[in-house]
Image (tube, helix red, strand yellow):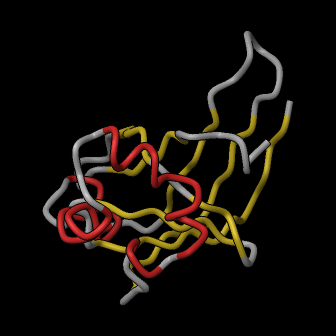
Amino acid sequence: MLEDAVVIWLTTVTAGGRPQSSPVWFVFEGGEFEIYSLADTARVRNIAGNPMVSLNLDSDEGSDVVAVEGVARMTDGPSSLDHAAYQEKYHRHIVDLGYTPEQFAAAYPASVRIAPLRWRVY
């Protein structure tokens, strides 16, 4: 299920306590989620202020629902360009958006790793 999903919804919390959800690309390996983001975004600022996040997969009309609560942290890499599993999963999508893999890595340099604390599957 995780391997096939293209998008997962990342929910962070603003300084004022409001949830903010964003669709993001991801890979799940080594027991953690890896997400690449634009550097100057609300989600990156929100994680800096409060690392508690949730992730939700799109469902199939109420089945195959996956919700994950976790702790996010910013990391120093690898970049999406050097992340083989990420490139394998998203290369076609990156090109379809008009980026080269190098351009995408430069545009989305913020590496976010999320360690799951609680899984809910319906």
Q: In which quarter of the image is residue 31?
A: bottom right
Left/right placement of residue 82 relative to residue 44 reads: right
- The residue nearer to you, when weighing 83 against 57, is 83
| Residue at the (50%, 56%) spot, across then down | 53
Instruction: Residue 9: give x, y in percent of width and height.
Output: 50, 39
- Is 46 located above or below residue 121 in the figure? below
Left/right placement of residue 21 relative to residue 28 reads: left
The quadrant of the image that shows the C terminus is: top right
Q: Quadrant of residue 69?
A: bottom right
Instruction: Residue 37: give x, y in percent of width and height.
Output: 31, 60
| Residue at the (67%, 63%) spot, across then down | 28
| Residue at the (42%, 71%) spot, across then down | 112
- The residue nearer to you, when weighing 7 against 121, is 7
> Of all residues shown, which one is farthest toward the left?
40
Left/right placement of residue 91 relative to residue 49 reads: right
| Residue at the (22%, 64%) spot, across then down | 45
- Is 102 located above or below residue 37 in the figure? below
